[in-house]
Amino acid sequence: MRTLAKAAAFAGRWFGLLILASALLGLLIPEQAARLTPWISVLLGVIMFGMGLTLRPADFKIALTRPQAVVVGVIAQFLIMPIVGWGLAELLQLPPLLVVGMVLVGAAPGGTASNVIVYLARGDVALSVAMTSISTLLAPFLTPLLVLWLAGSTLPVDAGDLFLSILQVVLIPVLLGIVARALFSRAVQKVLPLLPLVSVVGIMIVVFAVVGANADALLSTGALVIVAVILHNLIGLALGYGAGKAVRLPESSRRTVSVEVGMQNSGLAAALATTHFEPLAALPAALFSVWHNISGALLATYWSRRGGTGGAGRAGGGKGRKRTAGRGPRKRKR
């Protein structure tokens, strides 16, 4: 058990690099990687069940005590990213399947790794958990509608089938996880430290499979798709922070909204693209999964060094107070 706990801690710490390594491995052995694509939905279901095990009813209380932050964050999540994804795909004149893939990434709920990034960035972790959970519960209804609205004229989109898929691989596993924790809390408490390992391994396999299935396309048009994915993520991070600032949320909440908007459940997008379209449509999701963990880690490092500012609350305002205190002596020296 100790060995597994150490492995889980290692996986959580080096998540971005592990995902990058799995993508490179998918390029090196594409045929073997592509054979795993039928298992993507199953893997995602396991990951979402694990997410459900981490949730408790108390995690949703913030929606009642601080509704403005949650509402602004969720609206930004489902407006900014789908529209930006579609706009970039059209601007760069990507093929229809990649347009759908970009929209799917944008219309997905918040990524599970976002909670860790928010913690490292000295953001509001409670708000992050609430936003991820609520956006995940809304995804079966909003994701199909957004894909139909933005990509329906590019390729045929069956919103009903997308709805059923998200129910099966996201909503039902999450709800089962919440129920399991409520019924078997002691047993679940023992396995909670291992869940990061399950999530990381699952996403690694998803990225490995999708990159392998699209190795030729990635080598031929990869540069353009990579540019689109990087811009998608960076614009989402910037506009998410701007949305929080526009409604005067405290600094810790702005950081949280930024990360929640910019980091997506790319595993879900990859699973939906593979199931309902063609493997090529899953390529943006696979690349997004690699990049958003790298950018998220870099942003978290930057913000953690800046410390918290006004309203950081439990997100680590102490560091911000040290910096403020440190300015006094410099002024007196002058």
Image: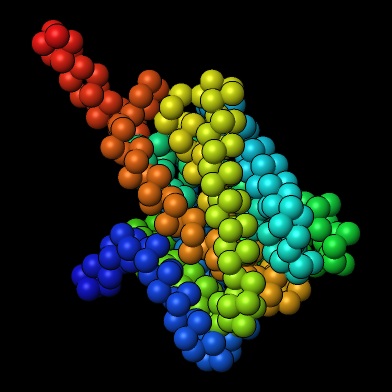
Quarter of the image where the C terminus is located: top left
- Residue 12 occupies quadrant: bottom left
| Residue 268 spot, x, y in % from top left | 61, 64
Q: Position of residue 236 (x, y in %)?
A: 58, 44
Left or right of 307 on screen, residue 96: right
Q: Residue furthest bottom?
A: 31
- Residue 144 on image: x %, y %: 77, 57
What residue is drawn where x is 24% and y is 19%?
324
Q: Residue at x 49, y 31 (%)?
A: 254
Q: Number of labelled discs?
A: 0
Which residue occupies 44% across, 57% down? 293
Residue 186 seen = no
Residue drawn at the location 38% of the way across and 51% of the way down: 297
Q: Is residue 192 left or right of residue 53?
A: left
Q: Decide: is 271 above or below 215.
A: above
Q: Quadrant of the N terminus?
A: bottom left
121 or 3: nearer the viewer: 121
- Whether residue 155 can be seen here: yes
Q: Is residue 243 left or right of residue 59?
A: right
